[in-house]
Amino acid sequence: FVRSVRPPAYPYAIDTALAEQGETIFLADCAGCHGTYAADETLETYPNLLFPLDVIGTDPVVAEGGTIHAPHMVDWYNESFYGEITRMVPDDPFTGYAAPPLDGVWATAPFLHNASVPSIALVLDSTKRPTYWRRVDYDSTNFDDKDLGWPCLSLDHGQDGLDKDEAKHIYDTTQFAHDNGGHPFGDHLTDHERDARHRC
């Protein structure tokens, strides 16, 4: 079933020249971790690599769930029917995150494993990620096809001190497990290269 799933077709205009430049950058900078993609699936690759937390640098809480925050869940899983099929060993060979395949990634905002980054443009430039942000609106058809993600507003405040109905709409990266740091692998690119890379 998983092999049969196909990403949604990109519904917006594509700048072919920019996408071709982006493909070159993607193959040089991203494909080694995230794989390659082709209409012919026999030509696709996916390395399925696990990266240590100190390399990827993103919020560690989910990765540390089985070793620090909820080790009892690992015991529960391993003692269940599922544990008879495959054992969960969250620190073997080390605690970290796997680089996911990026088929149809444009449609999966917000990004990183904890949904802390609203657009691919900001995934590729960790220096511009807002500490506090919220969506411009909650219309699921409102998509930022320039930055590839949710149209959002950067805020000067987080959730603290707000009514819960207002606070729930604010992504506050200072909260536990909500950090948006790490994955700085696009920071070295120029703005033009970054724009090309997230369009390939």
Image (cartoon, grey):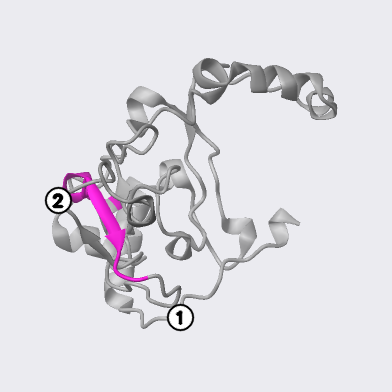
Q: Is residue 36 left or right of residue 76?
A: left
How crowded pointer 1 is (Cα within 10 Å; few <14, some 14-19, many 20+) is rated as few
Q: Residue furthest bottom?
A: 13
Q: Is residue 178 left or right of residue 154?
A: right
Residue bearing mark 2: 156
* Picture residue at 62% right of the left edge, 60% below the top: 41
- Residue 65's place in the image compared with 177, above or below, is above
Find residue 131 and report its horizontal and vertical position in percent.
22, 45
Could one spot residue 93 in this view of the protein?
Answer: no
Q: Is residue 173 left or right of residue 85?
A: left
Gap between marks 1 and 2 measured at Cα = 33 Å
Q: What's the amino acid at mark 1? A: Pro
* Picture residue at 70% right of the left edge, 54% below the top: 2
Query: Helix, strand or loop at disc 2?
Result: loop
Query: Which numbered marker is on residue 11?
Result: 1
Q: Earlier in the sequence, mark 1 or mark 2?
A: 1
Query: Which numbered marker is on residue 104?
Result: none
- Residue 71's place in the image compared with 119, above or below, is above
Q: Quadrant of residue 5?
A: bottom right
- Residue 191's place in the image compared with 176, above or below, is below
Mark 1 or 2, which is nearer the eye? 2
